Amino acid sequence: MFLVRAEGGPPRPFQPDFGVRPPPGSVGPLWSPDGRFLLFAGLKVREQGRADWWVAPVDGGPAVSTGASSLPRIDFVQFPTAWVGQHVLVAAGATMEGVNLHRVRISPGDWKVTGPLEPLTSGTGVSNMASVAADGRMAIPRFNWLVQLWAIDTGPGGVPASNAPQALTHDAAPKLDISLARDAPRLAYSAYAGSRGQHRTEVHLRDLASGEDNAPIRTSTRTISLNPHLSADGALVTWEDEADGHWAAFVGKAGDSSGREVCRDCSLLGFFSDSRHVLSTSGPKRLVRRNVESGAEAPLLELETGRILDADVSWDDRWLAVAIGRPDGTIALQLVPVGERADPPTEGIPVAEAERWLASPRWSPDGRRLYYLSDRDGFVCLWVQELDPSTKRPRGEPVAVFHAHRNPWRMSLPRGGFSFRVGRDRIVFNAAEITGNVLIGRLPPE
């Protein structure tokens, strides 16, 4: 968080020990009615504490916990969106049944938030903010946000044969983290489903030949993605879930709800071609090849600075494409050779870097191209970089594969929720259709 004077000037860090969640977990810090304090939803970045709402003086001083973490949870989305008088307006709900506005009282002086949450709006659609005048009149944006899966047909080597995406799904459940089997017409993805009070995260398996879709893996975790990955033949699938208070990764037969725990406090990023090994994180700076049966690790990459955001192994198992978040906030895509060595490299061949957004590096089947998501033209779109076949160094400028500039193909927010996968004959991605309106209302009396 930063403060900038209204007349301009350099930004000043505000509460640098805290991190603030991006949408849909926050709309950023909120001004108090007198402009002397800021309220924000976040947590201390160097401590393993609970997320909470905090109030801090603009002119300096420690942030004070409001105790809002003890409020009853209405649904997955719940964060402060405006500070009006002695109340905080709260956006709460889920995109399926609706995200609506509520309000909760905040005490002056000690800044404690006390319930219950009083509903202000109802119905389907999303209202995650409001502009409130001094006399209580409100302008409320109301939009619908539907995420579907789309496919673009490709030719040999993964080159798109058409820029006309075809819809694969049509329901209202948010869909994230896609995986395609290389050698079978099978797709896996995460979906957030169920009715209010019974929401769950599922791994769906879809037969792309028949269109049959089922959800053999269901959890009660509040995460919106289980990060599934299919083996090359589509026979195995990975997913993540909580186990004994830890985040754990599992591998099981596709279509079966049971699986084997592979590791804890790690993420699995995809199978190698033999299906006996997976690409895995081992901490935020380290990539390893992990044996599915034994869990044994072979080091592949270890960063000196920054953290690994995503990675993809080439179809011949010889190269990694890695997205790296740097300490200065920039993002870089690098290519790293896969080898058997005790001292893994700390950096690779640079492909792209950006101050705003780069994500989802994905190999073409022949290894001659690297696909990725970038907002280099002001929108999050799908781009491809041609590579030298022998050295893997970039050749020429990146080319746009698909421009997601309009409905129903939006990949803007939350950016981390959108991704894609490259198969032998198609590219599958998720994107949102956003429609909306503006409502006018008035706050009830204090």
Image: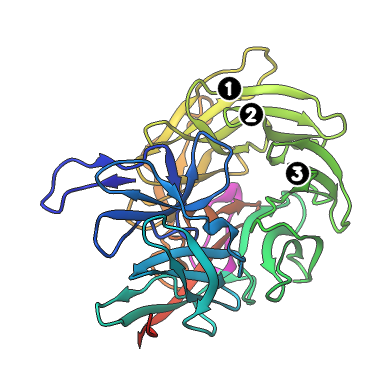
Query: Dot 3 surroundings within 10 Å: few (below 14), some, or many (20 or more)?
Result: few
Give residue 352's mark.
Answer: none
Is residue 22 shown left or right of residue 422? left
Amino acid, disc 3? Gly
* Foreground tag (2 vs 3): 3
Where does residue 212 sit, x and y in percent of width and height? 78, 71
Mark before the other along the chain sequence, 2 or 3? 3
Q: CA distance from mark 2 to mark 3?
A: 23 Å
Residue in front for this viewpoint, 297 or 201:
201
SS label for mark 2 = strand
Can the viewer see residue 128?
A: yes
The quadrant holding residue 191 is bottom right
Q: Residue at x 45, y 75 (%)?
A: 127
The residue that disc 2 covers is 287
| Marks 3 and 1 in Cβ contact (< 8 Å) | no
Is residue 248 shown left or right of residue 425? right
Residue in front for this viewpoint, 205 or 106:
106
Amino acid, disc 1? Glu
Q: Which residues are magenta?
A: 148-165
Give residue 245's mark.
Answer: 3
Residue in front for this viewpoint, 26 or 384:
26
Task: Tell me if residue 153 is in the magenta stretch.
Answer: yes
Mark before the other along the chain sequence, 3 or 1? 3
| Marks 2 and 1 in Cβ contact (< 8 Å) | yes
SS label for mark 1 = strand
The residue that disc 1 covers is 302
Is residue 99 shown left or right of residue 134? right
Query: Dot 1 surroundings within 10 Å: few (below 14), some, or many (20 or more)?
Result: many
